[in-house]
Image: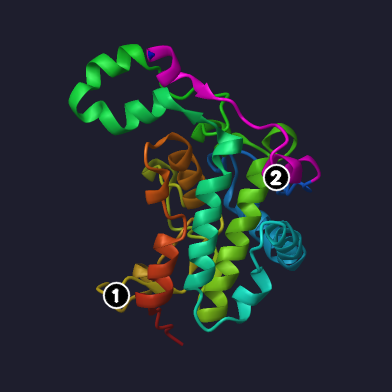
Amino acid sequence: MLDRLIRRDPRNPRGPLAELLDSYPAYVAPFPGDPYAITDTQAQANLDALLAQKMERLAIVGRALAGFDIDLEAAFAAPDPNPFFDRFDRWAVQSWPAIGGNDGRERLEHELRWFVRHRLRQAFPSVTDDELISSKRWRRSDRAGADIFYSLLFDLSLALGEVAMRRRPEIYWGLDLGIRPEEDRIEYHVPVLRGVRVPDAEDDPSCEEAYALESALFRSFAQICTTVNPELSQPTRYLRGMISHYRAVRRVT
């Protein structure tokens, strides 16, 4: 019984999402891989490439989502983005584990370690660096080849960001070059959503949000594939709050 409980659920190699990825075009940044290994200038080049190719990538991911009955163009025009976000979250929970796996060992470790931590640590090993849900693999990836799912995640971040920008035009893709390497933050040298601040922050440009949406989607992907209750994962939760409650940053001219 224990063997059945902790086995890795087999991935469906011919499931709809896997079939989509077979022909999905990769997005490779000019300077791919670990953001901590590039300069400010190279990070800016990556952002410039994103902005230059944004419409092309939105068309690609729009066609991909249409195959799952998710209408991205309608979401751009809808006065309320929440029905689209609801549909997106349900699709992610249903589809992503077919790519990332459903490992009972990791689910048990994630949900139960708070009361049997030491025993589980011996019985159930942690995520290995070669797994698709490994943050180390994701951060070092060029999003191509065996890592093509990361290109889809990148494009999905563009799509969700575009939905946010259609509702809140002050939101934009940018960089937070005020972050220093020693701070070890996920926003370092990656495109982030900017232009708004949390409701209770001071009215100061230094309080401007820098939301690493691609990173947030990756964390949701890993969580959906490893938690006992993946339906509780909402990849769009934080973005909904940005749209509804965050205030525009007042620019000093």
Look at the numbered disc 1 and give the secondary structure of its residue.
loop
- The circle drawn on residue 61 is none
Could you say where residue 108 lies in the image, as x and y percent from the top left?
34, 27
Task: Give yes or no for contact between labels 1 and 2 (Cβ–Cβ under 8 Å).
Answer: no
- The circle drawn on residue 199 is 1
Query: Looking at the image, is mark 1 or mark 2 earlier in the sequence?
Result: 2
Instruction: Identify the amino acid type marked 2.
Output: Pro
30 lies above or below 77: above
Q: Nearer the viewer, residue 198 or 223?
A: 223
Could you say where residue 92 lies in the image, as x and y percent from the top left?
54, 50
Could you say where residue 79 lies in the image, as x and y percent from the top left?
53, 84
The span picked out in magenta is 2-23
Quadrant where the image shows the N terminus: top left
Q: Is residue 237 magenta?
A: no
Q: State whether residue 32 appears in this view.
A: no
- The circle drawn on residue 16 is 2
Residue name at image x 37 percent, y 17 percent: 124
Residue name at image x 54 percent, y 31 percent: 101
Q: Is residue 9 magenta?
A: yes
Look at the numbered disc 2 and give the secondary structure of its residue.
helix
Q: Nearer the viewer, residue 153 or 204?
A: 153
Q: Nearer the viewer, residue 132 or 27?
A: 132
Asked which colour scheme the image uses, the reply is: rainbow
14 lies above or below 253: above
Q: How many other residues sit within 10 Å of disc 1, few (<14), some (14-19) or many (≥20)?
A: few
- Compared across the picture, whether 231 is left or right of 43 comes to left
Q: State whether residue 207 appears in this view.
A: yes
